[in-house]
Image (spheres, grey):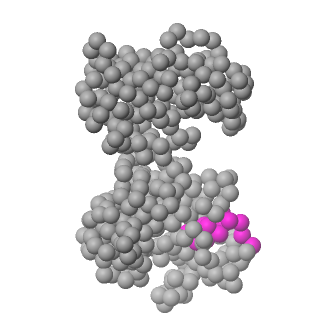
Amino acid sequence: MARIRLERLTKSFGNVTAVKGVDLEIQHGELLALLGPSGCGKTTILLMLAGIYRPTSGDIFFDDERVNDVPPKGRGVGLVFQSYALYPHMTVYDNIAFPLRLRKTPKDEIDRRVREVARIAKIEEYLQRKPSQLSGGQQQRVALCRALVKQPDLLLLDEPLSNLDARLRIETRTEIKRLQRELGITTILVTHDQIEAMTMADRVAVMRAGIIEQLSEPLELYQRPANLFVASFIGDPPMNLVSMEYQVDGGTPKLVGGNLAVTLPPEARAGLEQASSRQVVLGVRPEDWRLSSQPVDGKPAGEVYMLEPLGRDTLVDVRVGQQAIRALVPGGAPIRIGDRVWLDWDVDRMHLFDAQTEARLPVAAGAAAQGAGA
């Protein structure tokens, strides 16, 4: 196990800076996910940790040892690629044993370690098969075993599940998390899939354009996104974001816009006045809306224009004037396209952001806040 520390880590390719002064610390035995869209710098960080890329500036420490100049083979790193990269002409046994043979490990030790990791990964019965005789999930476990057999201090996973179908993805992420917990190996997972990051990781670093926007435990990311980017990226379906204007009516703070209005308790005013202007963004997750087929006093009404059945839930698209709202309701709810519905929301769980800086505003709505039609 290793404790990893990055200090002002930067990587440039010509005029393009892929990673911009990242500071990050990963604890012994922790599974940390680097999450973000393509091109945000997460794989570049992974390859610098592996020693494949050299940092342009900044430092990488494994425990207290600076490893910027240590070659890949001297870093004690196991790397699992998106493509598995198994040798098709070799058996599963030989694929797993390959890195140990390169090290000239004694034959008895190779056999012991190969069978041990195969037992942990539950692929003992496949050791004499070729990769072509395995399912995608089984091949992924072989690739994982090949990394684990080296007994690495740090395990790096680069989009390990993206080539699997939905069911195998669920099964395999459970297996990877179980193995990581059982072995206690410090692990960094690179993914663009928020579900993978949220379900597998102890902490998640959300990245955009080479920087870390927020580093938090998964539930904290969901409940208290630090800015508009994180709010829009975390959550499936994504958060509804409505441009609003902050007003004060007789000492009472209000938000008005997008055919909606929100009256807040007086104590919310201090947080709202930290905004750089009167323009703010209201965020409400689809699961926090409530729809009614009957008029609700003071609540906005809209028309259902699309239904997306998801099984347990149904995603309902509602037009409130020119504003599109997406709400989750129980599957089978008696709602049809064209129905007129009234919207209410859980104001205790709404989010407010500065429209200019995109930063989260320190506003606790509280139970006294009220949603109303504009």
The spot of residue 369 in percent (x, y) is 39, 18
Residue segment shown in magenta: 133-145
Name the residue rendered at 54%, 54% in the picture.
193
Is residue 38 found inside the magenta-colored segment of the image?
no
Q: Point out the residue furthest to the right here.
A: 133
Left or right: where 342 falls relative to 6: right
- Quarter the N terminus occupies: bottom left
**Viewer-proximal residue among 37 and 71:** 37
The spot of residue 264 in percent (x, y) is 36, 19
The spot of residue 156 in percent (x, y) is 46, 67
**Viewer-proximal residue among 214 and 87:** 214
* Occupied quadrant, residue 343: top right
Is residue 142 found inside the magenta-colored segment of the image?
yes
Residue 76 seen in the figure: no
* Occupied quadrant, residue 349: top left
Name the residue rendered at 49%, 72% in the picture.
79
Image: 152 above or below 314: below
Q: How many marks?
A: 0
Magenta stretch: dominant SS? helix
Name the residue rendered at 66%, 53% in the picture.
166
